[in-house]
Image: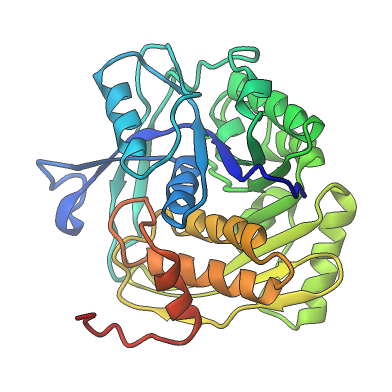
C-alpha cells in the first residue's frame, strides 16, 4: 500500500437519481417520491469525506440540469468533482420501495443508455486522475452496467496498479444489472487480479464465486477466505459483512477481516428499527478504507470501526452515510444508549 504524502481516495462509478416512496408506501400507492442522488462508489466517497479523507469521484454525467444537481450534491459533502466528464443523453435513475416488518424493500432500475452506461475506454485521463491519489475504489456494480463501463474500469485498475495505488473493490453483486453478455464471475475474475483489498457481504461472495462465508469458527472462516485469496493472488486483505435479516425492520450485523495471517471479527449489532438499510454496505466499505488508511496496523480497530459505521448508517435516511469519526468511535467504545446530546 502507498505510504507517501498522497492521501486522496478516488472512486469510480455511476451516480443516479434515487426516487423513494415516502412513509413506507408501495409503488402502487404513492403519488410522490423523495429525491436524492446515490451510487455505491459515490456513497463511499461521501462517507470518507465526512470522515475527513480527501476524495475525488469520477463518473460521466449528462450536460444538463440533472447532471449539475448530482455535482452540487457531491460538492456539499466536500467530494472532489473536477474529474467528472460530461456527455451522453440521460441520468440513470433507480426507484426504491422501502419495506417494513416482513415486507422486503424493492428496487427498480432505469439506467439503460445512461451517460455512464455509454462510457467508453480512453474517455478518462487516468494518469491525471491518479496523480495525487493513494487509493482507487470501485465496486462490482460498475462493470455490471455495460461492456463499456467494464472496459473503462479495467483500464482504470491497470493504471492504478501501474502508478502504485492501493485498489479496493466491493463485490456488490446486482443480478438485475448483469445483462450485457458476460457473467459477473467472468468479468470480476479479470478485474480482481489488480485488487489489494476485497470487500463484500456474505451473499456477494456466495452468488459470484460460490464461496460460503458463514458465522462459523474463526479457523473455518480463515480457510474459506484463504481459498479465495489463492485464486486472486493480488488480494492481500478481505473484509466481509455478515448480516442476518430477521425482517426488513430488524437485522443483526457483524464484520470480519483477514490479512492472510490472522482473522479478526467485530461485535454483533442488533439493529432495530431500521430507518434505511440502503448504503449500509457502502458505509462498511468506507469504514474499511478509512481504517486501513488511519490505523492499518490495528486490524481489530479497523473491523470494529467499519462495522460500527455500517450499523449507524441504518439510522440515516438516504444512501449517504453522514457521520463524524467521533460518532463512530463512540459506538465502537460501547456507547449505545442513543440518549440526547445536550
Colouring: rainbow
Q: Residue at x 44, y 17 (%)?
A: 113
Please determine whether, in this image, residue 77 is positioned above or below residue 255.
above
Q: Residue furthest left?
A: 31
The quarter of the displayed image where residue 280 is located: bottom left
Please determine whether, in this image, residue 261 is positioned above or below residue 86.
below
- Is any atom of residue 137 visible in this view? yes
Q: Residue at x 75, y 44 (%)?
A: 195
Residue 298, x across and y down, in percent: 70, 73
- Is any atom of residue 255 visible in this view? no
The quarter of the displayed image where residue 25 is located: bottom left
Q: Residue at x 73, y 60 (%)?
A: 238
Would residue 267 be found to the left or right of residue 214 on screen?
left
Would residue 33 be found to the left or right of residue 113 on screen?
left
Q: Residue at x 76, y 80 (%)?
A: 218
The number of discs equals 0
The quarter of the displayed image where residue 341 is located: bottom left
Please determine whether, in this image, residue 53 is positioned above or below residue 307.
above
> Which image quarter is the C terminus in?
bottom left
Residue 134, x across and y down, in percent: 67, 42
Residue 97, x across and y down, in percent: 27, 50
Q: Nearer the viewer, residue 213 or 307?
A: 307
Residue 289, x across and y down, in percent: 61, 55
Q: Nearer the viewer, residue 163 or 215?
A: 163
Amino acid at each position: 500500500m502507498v505510504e507517501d504524502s498522497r492521501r486522496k481516495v478516488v472512486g469510480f462509478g455511476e451516480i443516479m437519481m434515487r426516487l423513494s416512496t415516502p412513509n413506507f408506501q408501495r409503488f402502487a400507492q404513492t403519488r410522490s417520491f423523495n429525491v436524492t442522488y446515490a451510487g455505491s462508489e459515490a456513497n463511499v466517497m461521501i462517507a470518507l469525506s465526512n470522515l475527513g479523507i480527501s476524495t475525488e469521484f469520477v463518473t460521466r454525467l449528462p450536460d444538463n440540469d440533472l447532471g449539475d444537481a448530482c455535482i452540487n450534491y457531491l460538492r456539499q459533502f466536500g467530494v472532489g468533482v473536477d474529474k467528472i466528464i460530461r456527455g451522453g443523453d440521460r441520468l440513470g435513475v433507480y426507484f426504491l420501495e422501502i419495506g417494513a416488518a416482513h415486507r422486503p424493500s424493492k428496487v427498480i432500475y432505469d439506467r439503460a443508455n445512461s451517460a455512464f452506461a455509454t462510457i467508453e475506454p480512453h474517455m478518462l485521463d487516468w494518469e491525471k486522475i491518479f496523480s495525487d491519489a493513494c487509493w482507487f475504489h470501485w465496486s462490482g456494480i460498475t462493470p455490471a452496467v455495460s461492456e463499456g463501463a467494464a472496459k473503462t474500469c479495467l483500464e482504470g485498475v491497470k493504471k492504478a496498479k501501474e502508478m502504485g495505488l492501493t485498489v479496493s473493490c466491493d463485490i456488490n453483486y446486482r443480478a438485475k444489472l448483469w445483462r450485457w453478455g458476460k457473467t459477473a464471475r467472468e468479468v470480476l475474475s479479470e478485474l480482481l487480479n489488480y485488487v489489494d483489498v476485497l470487500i463484500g457481504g456474505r451473499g456477494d461472495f456466495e452468488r459470484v464465486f460460490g464461496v460460503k462465508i458463514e458465522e462459523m469458527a474463526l479457523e473455518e472462516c480463515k480457510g474459506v477466505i484463504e481459498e479465495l485469496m489463492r485464486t486472486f493472488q493480488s488480494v492481500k486483505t478481505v473484509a466481509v459483512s455478515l448480516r442476518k435479516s430477521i425482517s426488513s425492520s430488524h437485522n443483526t450485523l457483524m464484520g470480519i477481516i483477514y490479512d492472510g495471517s490472522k482473522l479478526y471479527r467485530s461485535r454483533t449489532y442488533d439493529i432495530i428499527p431500521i430507518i434505511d438499510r440502503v448504503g449500509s454496505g457502502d458505509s462498511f466499505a468506507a469504514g474499511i478504507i478509512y481504517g486501513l488508511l488511519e490505523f492499518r496496523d490495528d486490524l481489530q480497530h479497523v473491523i470494529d470501526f467499519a462495522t460500527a459505521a455500517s450499523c449507524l448508517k441504518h439510522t440515516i435516511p438516504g444512501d449517504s452515510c453522514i457521520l463524524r469519526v467521533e460518532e463512530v468511535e463512540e459506538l465502537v467504545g460501547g456507547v449505545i444508549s442513543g440518549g440526547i446530546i445536550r
